[in-house]
Image (cartoon, rainbow, N blue to C red):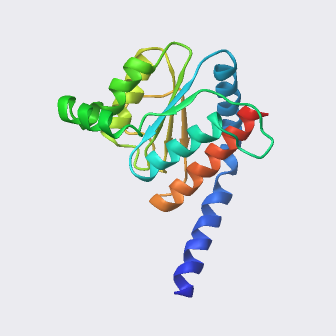
Amino acid sequence: MWDLVNMCWKEHLEVMEALEPLFPLVMRLGETLSKIVRSGGKVLIFGNGGSAASAQHFASELVGRLVKGDGRHFPALAITTDSSLMTALANDFGYEEVFARQVEVLGCLGDMVIGLTTSGSSPNVLRALELGGERGLVTVAFTGEEGLKGGGVDVEIRVPSSSTPRIQEAHDFILHTVAALVKT
């Protein structure tokens, strides 16, 4: 058991240390998102499984408070949370459209869409990012070392790992950092 815990810890530290070259990109993302929300735009964020949970968490940090005493609140919506809507869209249009349909209806010029996909190949995330780009929204993808499989985005945060748990941990760290940048 100790060996497994130690191995997970060491992997975590290695990935976190490997993120340093991404810091300028993370800062740019924080600045861009800050400009968007301060000028009346919002962020729509989405992903599958653990990435859906990260989307919810990030939205709650922006709408709620990141730290005690933080009085700034910004419009953010995890479009992964409405089970009735998600299952209706999946049933009527196919699972590939569950996020794209919401981006189409909820996204406005001046908004940002953030898709989380550890594999870089989730069809529903790719489709929503593609549609966001077509509609002129700022598009951001959080991926793993394989990168995004599909069309281009405005910003890609590519975590240098192939381990899903380590990628998700890094995504959460970066999202917390972006939230802190937006709130300062």
Instruction: Identify which residue is drawn at 51% across, 43% down.
Output: 56
Q: Nearer the viewer, residue 61 or 150?
A: 61
Q: Is residue 67 left or right of residue 169?
A: right
Q: Is residue 24 left or right of residue 124?
A: right
Q: Is residue 159 above or below residue 2?
A: above
Q: Nearer the viewer, residue 130 or 114?
A: 114
Q: Position of residue 63 (x, y in %)?
A: 63, 34
Q: Is residue 62 left or right of residue 43?
A: right
Instruction: Identify which residue is drawn at 75% across, 46% down.
Output: 67
Q: Is residue 103 above or below residue 18?
A: above
Q: Position of residue 105 (x, y in %)?
A: 38, 18
Q: Is residue 160 above or below residue 148?
A: below
Instruction: Identify which residue is drawn at 50% across, 19% down.
Output: 137
Instruction: Identify which residue is drawn at 56% across, 57% down.
Output: 169
Q: Based on the displayed image, in which of its 4 quarters is residue 127 positioned?
A: top left
Q: Position of residue 122 (x, y in %)?
A: 34, 42
- The quarter of the picture where the C terminus appears is top right
Q: Position of residue 125 (x, y in %)?
A: 38, 36
* Direction left: furthest residue: 92
